[in-house]
Amino acid sequence: MKKLLSILIVLSMALAIAACSGSNNGNKPANTGGNTGGDDAAPSNAAAEEGFKDGKYTTPVTLSTVWGLNQNGSVFKEGETIEDNVHTRLIKERLGIDIKYDWVVTNTNDAYKTKLRLMLSSGEEMPDVVVYRGDLETVNMLIDSGQFMPVGDLVDQYANETYKAGLDLDPTIWLPITRDGGKMALPILDYAYNADHVMWIREDWLEKLNLKAPATIDEMETVMDAFVKGDPDGDGSANTLGLATGFKNGFSNWMTDIGFVFGAFGTMPGQWNLSADGKLEHGSINPAAKQALGKLKEWLDKGYISQDSALLDESTGAELFTKGKAGIVFGPNWLPAWPFPDLLNNVPGAKYKAYPVPAGPDGKIGSAGGNPPANGYVFINKNSEHPEAILHYYNWFFDHMANPQPGSEFEKGFAEGYDYATLPDGSITADIAKYPELFPGLKDQTAPPLYYTLTYEGARIPTLYAETHVKLAGGAEPATPYEKQEFNTRLKENTDAMKVVMDQQDIRMKNYYMGPLTETMQSKNELLNKLLNETFSKIIYGQQPVDAFDAMVGNWKKSGGEQIKMEVNEWYNSVK
C-alpha cells in the first residue's frame, strides 16, 4: 500500500509541481558547515564555493553515493540506468554536479540496509552522501560511525528559504538525529499532516437510519448500536458492525485505529507522550488507558467491534469496512485513493464521508499523528570535498520541481516522455505507458525520474498538500499546476477530509521519543511490550478484569519500565 501511495504521490508531483520560490544561495560566502554543538566541525570550503556561480559549479564536481533500487523505482527507459539517465544528465548540465554511485543493489529483502550496515561494521569509508529511509537503528549506526558531519551550519549558509521553512514547521524534526547538540543529517521533507486521522462513516447508512454524525464518544455509541441492530445493509440479517478494527499490530495504528478511544480519556498507547510536568511518559501505563480498555471491552461485548479484532492487522481490519460489514473506520485523509475503491466495487451505491474525531466524556480529543514531516535523511561525509553540493542539489528541486508556477519550465513534469507526454490533441497525460508508439524504448511502469532522485521524490514542501486541499475544499478554483493536478486526480471526499484534519490540528498526540534504543530497552523491550499487549487484549476480551491493568503497570515498572522511563527522559532533556 505504501509503495502504491508513494508512486501516486510522485506522479501527482511530477505533473503538478509548483513554485520557483526558493532563493539561490550559491553566492553566499563559504564557511562550509561548521560544528553546531557537535565535536566534529565541517571543513572550510571557501575556495570550492567560489566556483559555484549563477546556480552552477563552473568546474563540475563529483558527488559520490550508494543506492538501493526498489522494485517500483528500478525500471528505466531503454538504454538508461541509475548511473546514466535523464535525471543524472540534467543535474550535471544545470548544476555542474556529476553523481557517481560507488555501488548499487536491488533492494530486495532490505539488501540496501544490509550492505550499509556491513560497511559500517567493518569501518569502510563511506561516500560523500548516504541517503537512508528506514529504521532508526540504522540511522543511529550511521551517526555513531563518526564518518558524517554536523549539518547545522551547512543548512544556515546554503539551504534556500523553502527548505528552511519546512524544517522550521516542526523543530522536533531534528530530535532523532541530534547528538551532543549537533544536527547530524539533513531531513528529507515530506508532506505534513498526511498521517493524521479522521473518522470515516458510511454516509448512506446514516441516511438510511436517519442518524447524524457523532461528535462525541457517547453519540458514536448510539450510531454504532444502530449500525449493529438496524440492518443498515438491508440484507435482513444481523451481520453488521459499528467500527472496523484490527489491533494485531498494536492499539494505535495508521488505519483501523482505536487510539482515538485512548485519546478521548487523555493518553495515547504504544508511545511516549509529553506529560503536563514536561516529562515523557509511556502512554500505555497512564491511568487513562485503563478507562479506554474498559470502554473497548464494553464495545466488544455489545458487538460494536469484531470478535476477531485481535487477529486482524490494519489491512484485514479495513476489509470489514470495504466489504460493507462495518460502518465506521478511522484513518488518514487519503483512504479514498486506497482502499475505499474496494468498497465501491463491493457495495455499489455506497457513500462515505470524513468527520472529526469524537470527544470523550470530559471533552478530551486525542489522535495519533502530528509527527515531524520527515521521511528519511541525508548524511554528509565529513571528508567530502564539497559538502555543500547536496544542498545545492536539494535547493534546485525545491526551486523548480516542488511547486512551479504556470508557464515555468517544469510546469508539466520532469521530462517529456518520462513522467508525462503531450498527446497529438495537445492534452497532457501521465499514463505514457499507454502510448508506446509515441515513445520508443519506453517500458511498462517506467519509474518517473523523481522516484530515483537522491532525495527520493525530488522535494516536497510540507504544507503544500494540506494547504492545497483546504483551498480546494473551500471552493476555490485550482490555479497552479500542483493544484490542478490534485483537483483532477483526488476525489472530493479526500479533499474534504484534509480540511477536517486541518480544522482539528490541536488533537494530535505526538510520540516524543525518537532516539536510539536505550540500554535497558535493548534487553527489556520485547518482554515489556509483550506484557502490555497481552494484558490489553485479555482485558478487552474479558479474560482478565479491568483492574488487572493496575497490577500490569506495577510489573511493567519493576521489570525495567521505570529504568527505561529515566533513560528516555535523559535523552529528551539532552536534545529538546
Image: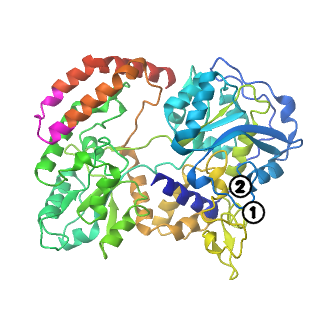
Give the label on residue 400, or none.
2
The answer to whether 511 is drawn above or below residue 414 in the figure is: above
Question: As rendered, which of 252 and 197 lies closer to the eye?
Answer: 252
Label 1: which secondary element: loop
The answer to whether 321 is drawn above or below residue 521 in the figure is: below
Mark 1 or 2, nearer chain start? 2
| Residue located 80% across and 41% down the image | 26
Give the label on residue 393, or none.
none
Is 185 on the left-hand or right-hand side of 32? left
The three-letter code of the residue at mark 1 reads Glu
Q: Which residue is mark 1?
A: 409
User: Percent from the top left, x then y, of residue 2?
Assistant: 47, 52
| Residue located 39% across and 57% down the image | 500
The residues bearing labels 1 and 2 have C-alpha atoms spaced at a distance of 8 Å
Question: In the rendered image, is residue 281 in sight?
Answer: yes
- Tell me whether circle 1 and circle 2 mark residues in contact (CB < 8 Å): yes
Question: As rendered, which of 293 and 517 lies closer to the eye?
Answer: 517
User: Percent from the top left, x then y, of residue 289?
Assistant: 23, 35
> Over which residues does the magenta segment extend?
537-550
312 part of magenta stretch: no
User: Percent from the top left, x then y, of residue 247?
Assistant: 28, 45
Is 349 on the left-hand or right-hand side of 387? left
Q: In the rendered view of the protein, which quadrant contains the N terminus?
A: bottom left
